Image: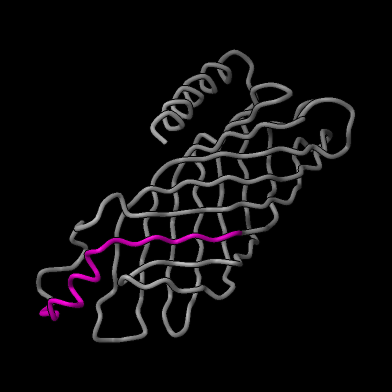
Amino acid sequence: MKFIAQILVLLCFTSLASAEEGGRPYVSIRPLGFTFSADTEVLEQNQDINRGWAVGGSIGASLNDYFKIDLLAIDYAENKYGGSEVDTLTIMPVLKVGLFGGDFALKPYATLGLGASHVNFQFEDTQIPDLDGWGLGWQVGAGVDYPIPSRNLAIGVFYRYSSSVSLSEDWDPVVSDYALPTEIRNKMEAGWEVNYHSIGIEIRFGGVLNP
């Protein structure tokens, strides 16, 4: 995992240099996304999550016919399970590897991202306080773009598998003012993990390579 992080950091600096030397910057939005086949581990219990929704956006640069990089990708997802809810915010660089050049109308690609994640659990049991915390976030995925060079934009669909996990156990997310039973406090301090699949639409402004 540390090796992947080093590679992504290196690619960020490479993309900045490429942008200065002729790389094409872009801004993208993900206005409509849906999550499915999700699960979470919190309070020492595994729970299946109902379908939810997701939105996001990125700024980045097209490097060449094979590489793009989202220097900053921000994604938000809301999922519910039972009467509880978990909201996830991820902030990370994302590398895209694909066939962005050539005369093909559709441009397939794969993605890999690693960064920070913030979660907020709102529990059905009102005796348990909301749980907030920062952790590690990563994602892998794929997509297909349909570029419109005359408009310098591209419309596409994407798939992603995203995971967020606390960095260690005993990370003490509980506000000390809460007079919680020891058993519940220990469960809240045991860490958490959220995993989900998502599909959606992405619109990218700029960064389109001429065929």
Of the 4 image quadrants, the one containing the N terminus is: top left
Name the residue located 44 percent from the left edge and 85 percent from the top edge.
83
Write the start and end of the magenta stretch as one range.
Answer: 179-197
Q: Is residue 163 magenta?
A: no
Q: Nearer the viewer, residue 150 or 200?
A: 200
Image: 51 above or below 118? below
Quadrant of residue 174 within the rendered picture: bottom left
167 left or right, relative to 113: left
Q: Residue at x 39, y 60 (%)?
A: 193
Q: Residue at x 64, y 61 (%)?
A: 33
Q: What percent of the width, then of the height, locates residue 158?
A: 69, 50
| Residue 103, quarter of picture | top right
In this picture, is 97 found above or below 117?
A: above
19 is higher (above) or lower (below) than 100: above
Q: Position of residue 14 (x, y in %)?
A: 52, 19
Is 34 on the left or on the right of 14, as rendered?
right
| Rendered image coloring scheme | one colour
Q: Looking at the image, which residue is at 88% across and 33% down?
A: 104
Q: Is residue 193 magenta?
A: yes
Quadrant position of the C terminus in the picture: top right
Is the residue 70 above or below the residue 139 in the image? Answer: above
Picture coordinates of residue 200, whole percent (x, y): 68, 58
Point out the residue furthest to the top here: 21
> 27 or 91: nearer the eye?
91
The answer to which image quadrant residue 191 occupies is bottom left
Total numbered labels placed on residues in the image? 0
Residue 194 horizontal/vertical position (percent): 44, 61
